[in-house]
Image: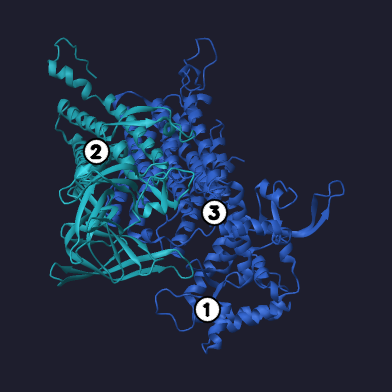
Chain colours: A cyan, B blue
């Protein structure tokens, strides 16, 4: 080893870049990523997986409650500790990686494996970024012998107000949950203003306890009420869904008269109210996005192992019809065998066989970044094989020679 | 006498072969009694798969008793303490005998099966509630002691009415568990056992075997089932206590099966043999022996070399048994080796031993053998404790794909394996370094190289395994990465191994620091392997998982303790403390490790 005396001072940009490119920073970032991932797992004990993904991994900054840090050994969190989130750590890691290659760039065969594998990692991080920003997921639920032409996005609730006065057409006004939370909503098609009184991410329906305050002054909420429950835990093996509920106050647009406070819940569809000569349905439901085609569920098939209740297979036999009702395709969607159709992928996701007719749930995904992990996987694996392979060959040759 | 060391490896191997051979000799049934061991080999269907009656009986007994044999005899009251009693003239009851006696209880005059103490009640609140005596160590009770207890029945009724036990109420959960055990026993007495292969239904995909009552029902409708006739005659003879008749019919039925259903007949016999041979149990014992031989070979006597060679030969022999057992499981289940937690433990053990054997072959220092023995033994003990029922159970729909089980699962399990090997090599680095002079000179360099090389393997395998899992998820439900606990666990292993390598490359750590980091890798893998399954503790599971949580914590603390040792200043290490001043007696010139390296 030859030591070069450091007489020449480095250019300023190199001095600035040096710490950014250092391997010590890499190690520190790895350690912090591990802490983030570890607590992002513990947070799922009492939080939904999507809440955790958004607050821990797809964020710049996360406040980790002390309760999570102590592995839920205490029940409440008097305070939280700030920690860099997934995007911040990922971003700095990416910068660190690029800076390191920039500063120590040397194109040699010996480093070929490292280049390929780091290239693959860059693709992977970008892939997760693209997925986080642009991927859309939803569920299409279809009854056996029934049809569906829309996808529900359970994570984005909306308040739907449907004018059902005309039996031929339903005129729907859908207000996203985010808009509702910002303050009272006025819509040109509706004769009343809408105000959110209280919102619950997950709630179950119960009988009204007269001891407690009741909010609803009209509609179904005068007979039954709801109580808030913790959101579905990411660690829950049953993986149920959250069932949001809300108290909604309606006031007449012109007179300002109170039209009553309604309780809406994911389970309650078809709750009606009358304003003037018009009848409306009011419902809190998953956001729906409509498709220019219809799925008809011919058969929902559920197989178990003989003499057990262990599921062996779920299959949905679906006929796809275009907007004119002409059948374009007939297909079986089953476990590990999704359907690719018009840029979206349909996966067999759930099946409620306790109901009659049975209801199948198809997970519908559109992800522009879907190919990136595949590319990345190939690159990183290849890079490691090349790099470690070269080292191993050298090592074995020396070992055998000695 | 001088030839003895040379022959030592072959003597050890010979003894081991004799020991294993002794285990394969089938134990005979009592010629005058019922041929239970033969009956045990009959194929039947349970939980969706065809298995021998032997496995069925073991699983049922395990379920209620948490062990695979029952013991009975005469109980005599302790004169000093009427609460206690002593067992006299005790005898062991094999699972098949217990299951047959239970099933045929209404056929027989002898009701002693209701007095067998097989129900395990390990919660003292429940024991007190039932007014039962405490039986520390065993905690096993007979049907007659609790099953008709009115308080118990009313508690169970209440729990049924409230649709299951309250989540965090241990008492209710334990009462419920006992109720389920009672129900399982009761079902057995009701012949809820699928013994009969339906005649003429070979082609229809999944064949539902019939219980005796169902087959009898079909018989009355005019469908004849050959097996039904055999079973009824056998059971009648059993009820009338006529062993000869029973045994004769049993032999006839076996001959019929061999002709009519050869595949089921032979696989059931193979599985019965596998159950009785208990290959993993004996492999664990032999690994223990390897460990002892390996350690003794470091004592610096003239026997070092032959001892190490003996340990190596014994490792290969044990590995052969381990491999054979894995292959039998693969052929019986028709699945890749890892399908559940139990099989992952035996497969990780196998992988560790293979990897360490290669290391030993390269370095011939004894280190590989000792780590092979430790990891092989520990994983098999862990596996043994994970048995709660049928270890070859059927798989849930989403897992029902041999392609991904063979690629993703195997790869990620090898990732666990390599990380564990690196971790245990590192433990050896610290233990040998501190307490022995073994690591002087080349020794520490070579061990450092091993740790480094294995960590490289670990990062490769765990990365590829994790990404394959992502691709499987993408193929199954359209989400490459969902940040769920199991995925995060796998990611932690990848990042940790990458961290170890980068720390080494950057010079933050050298050989000793890397060893300390690699030991922490053991904790990371243990978390990913078990911890993520335990996140729900307190929410869903009792008993087994709670015990697992404690063991996980014990393991993590032990690793941290070793890391703490590894941080001791080098002057306190036997291997690294500065040379003694001139005049003092010379230190041992070379250690086994260094000499082995020189000699290769």
x and y, in percent, of residue A366 in the image: 20, 53
Marks 3/1: CA–CA distance: 31 Å
Q: Can you identify the residue that label 1 sits on?
A: B258
Percent coordinates x, y for residue B318 in the rendering: 51, 51
Which image quadrant for residue A253?
top left
Mark 2 to mark 3 CA distance (whole Å): 55 Å
Q: Residue at x 22, y 21 (%)?
A: A19
Q: Which residue is mark 2?
A: A182
**B403 lies above or below A157:** below
- Name the mark nearer the viewer: 3 or 1: 3
Mark 1 residue element: helix
- Name the side, left or right, on which A322 lies relative to B563: left
Residue sitting nearer the eye, A279 or B266 = A279
Badge 2 and badge 3 in a common chain: no
Q: Is residue B509 above or below residue B378?
A: above
Residue A303 seen from this side: yes
Q: A36 left or right of B8?
A: left
Residue farthest toward the right in the current orientation of the protein: B79
| Residue under numbered circle 3 | B387
The residues tagged by marks 1 and 2 sit, at their Cα atoms, a distance apart of 76 Å
Q: Secondary structure at mark 2?
A: helix
Image mark 2: chain: A
């Amino acid at each position: 080893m030859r030591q070069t005396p450091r007489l020449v001072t480095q250019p300023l940009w190199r001095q600035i870049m040096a710490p950014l490119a250092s391997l010590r920073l890499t190690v520190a970032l790895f350690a912090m990523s591990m802490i983030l991932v570890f607590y992002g797992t513990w947070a799922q004990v009492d939080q939904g997986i999507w809440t955790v993904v958004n607050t821990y991994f797809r964020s710049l900054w996360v406040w980790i409650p002390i309760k999570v840090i102590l592995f839920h050994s205490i029940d409440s969190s008097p305070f939280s500790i700030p920690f860099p989130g997934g995007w911040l750590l990922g971003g700095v890691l990416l910068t660190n990686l690029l800076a390191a290659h920039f500063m120590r760039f040397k194109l040699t065969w010996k480093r070929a494996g490292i280049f390929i594998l780091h290239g693959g990692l860059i693709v992977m991080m970008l892939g997760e970024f693209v997925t986080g920003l642009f991927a859309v997921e939803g569920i299409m639920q279809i009854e056996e012998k029934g049809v569906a032409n829309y996808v529900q996005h359970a994570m984005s609730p909306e308040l739907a107000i449907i004018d059902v006065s005309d039996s031929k057409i339903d005129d729907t006004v859908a207000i996203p949950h985010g808009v509702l939370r910002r303050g009272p909503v006025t819509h040109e098609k509706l004769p009343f203003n809408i105000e959110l009184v209280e919102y619950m991410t997950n709630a179950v329906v119960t009988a009204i306890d007269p001891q407690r305050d009741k909010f609803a002054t009209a509609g179904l909420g005068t007979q039954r009420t709801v109580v808030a429950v913790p959101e579905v835990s990411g660690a829950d093996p049953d993986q149920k869904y959250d069932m949001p509920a809300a108290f909604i106050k309606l006031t007449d647009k012109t007179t300002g008269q109170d039209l009553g406070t309604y309780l809406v819940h994911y389970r309650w569809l078809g709750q009606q109210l009358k304003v003037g000569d018009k009848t409306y349905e009011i419902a809190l439901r998953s956001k729906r996005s409509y498709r220019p085609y219809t799925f008809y569920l011919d058969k929902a098939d559920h197989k178990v192992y003989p003499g057990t209740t262990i599921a062996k297979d779920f299959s949905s036999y679906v006929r796809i019809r275009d907007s004119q009702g002409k059948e374009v395709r007939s297909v079986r969607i089953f476990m590990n065998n999704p359907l690719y159709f018009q840029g979206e992928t349909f996966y067999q996701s759930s099946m409620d066989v306790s109901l009659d007719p049975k209801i199948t749930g198809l997970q519908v995904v559109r992800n522009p970044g879907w190919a990136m992990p595949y590319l990345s996987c190939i690159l990183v694996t290849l890079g490691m094989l090349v790099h470690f392979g070269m080292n191993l060959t050298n090592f074995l040759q020396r070992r055998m020679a000695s | 006498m001088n030839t003895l060391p040379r022959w030592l490896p072959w003597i050890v191997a010979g003894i081991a072969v004799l020991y294993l051979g002794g285990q394969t000799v089938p134990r005979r049934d009592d010629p005058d009694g019922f041929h239970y061991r033969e009956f045990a080999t009959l194929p039947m269907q349970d939980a969706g798969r065809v298995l021998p009656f032997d496995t069925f009986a073991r699983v049922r007994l395990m379920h209620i008793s948490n062990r695979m044999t029952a013991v009975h005899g005469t109980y005599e009251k302790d004169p000093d303490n009427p609460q206690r009693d002593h067992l006299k003239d005790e005898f062991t009851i094999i699972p098949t005998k217990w299951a047959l006696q239970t099933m045929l209880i209404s056929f027989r005059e002898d009701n002693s099966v209701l007095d067998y103490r097989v129900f395990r009640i390990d919660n003292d609140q429940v024991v007190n509630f039932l007014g039962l005596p405490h039986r520390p160590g065993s905690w096993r009770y007979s049907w007659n002691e609790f099953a008709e207890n009115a308080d118990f029945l009313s508690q169970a009724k209440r729990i049924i009415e409230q649709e299951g036990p309250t989540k965090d109420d241990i008492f209710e959960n334990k009462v419920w568990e006992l109720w389920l055990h009672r129900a399982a026993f009761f079902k057995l007495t009701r012949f809820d056992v699928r013994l009969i292969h339906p005649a003429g239904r070979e082609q229809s995909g999944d064949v539902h075997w019939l219980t005796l009552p169902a087959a009898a029902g079909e018989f009355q409708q005019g469908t004849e089932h050959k097996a039904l006739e055999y079973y009824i005659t056998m059971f009648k003879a059993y009820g009338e206590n006529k062993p000869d008749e029973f045994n004769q019919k049993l032999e006839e039925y076996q001959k019929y099966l061999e002709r009519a259903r050869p595949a089921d007949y032979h696989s059931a016999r193979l599985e019965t043999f596998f159950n009785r041979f208990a290959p993993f149990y004996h492999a664990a014992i032999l690994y223990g022996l390897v460990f002892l031989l390996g350690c003794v070979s470091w004592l610096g006597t003239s026997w070092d070399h032959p001892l190490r060679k003996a340990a190596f030969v014994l490792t290969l022999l044990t590995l052969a048994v381990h491999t054979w057992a894995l292959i039998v499981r693969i052929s019986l289940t028709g699945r890749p080796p890892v399908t559940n937690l139990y099989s992952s433990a035996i497969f990780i053990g196998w992988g560790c031993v293979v990897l360490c054997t290669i290391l030993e072959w390269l370095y011939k220092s004894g280190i590989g053998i000792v780590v092979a023995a430790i990891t092989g033994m520990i994983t098999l003990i862990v596996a043994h404790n994970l048995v709660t029922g049928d270890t070859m159970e059927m798989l849930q729909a989403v897992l029902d794909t041999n392609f991904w089980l063979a690629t993703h699962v195997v790869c990620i399990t090898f990732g666990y394996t390599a990380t564990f090997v690196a971790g245990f090599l590192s433990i050896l680095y610290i233990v040998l370094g501190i307490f022995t002079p073994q690591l002087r000179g080349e020794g520490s360099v070579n061990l450092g190289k091993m740790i480094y090389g294995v960590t490289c393997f670990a990062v490769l395998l765990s990365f590829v395994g994790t990404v394959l899992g992502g691709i499987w998820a993408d193929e199954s439900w359209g989400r490459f990465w969902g940040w769920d606990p199991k995925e995060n666990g796998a990611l932690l292993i990848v990042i940790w191994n990458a961290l170890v390598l980068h720390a080494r490359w950057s010079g933050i750590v050298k050989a000793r620091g890397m060893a300390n980091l690699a030991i922490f890798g053991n904790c990371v893998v243990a978390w990913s392997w078990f911890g993520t399954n335990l996140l729900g503790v307190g929410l869903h599971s009792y008993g087994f998982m709670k015990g697992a949580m404690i063991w996980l914590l014990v393991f993590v603390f032990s690793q941290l303790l070793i890391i703490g040792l590894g941080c001791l200043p080098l002057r306190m290490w036997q291997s690294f403390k500065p040379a003694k001043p001139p005049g003092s007696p010379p230190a041992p010139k070379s250690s086994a490790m260094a000499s082995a390296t020189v000699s290769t």
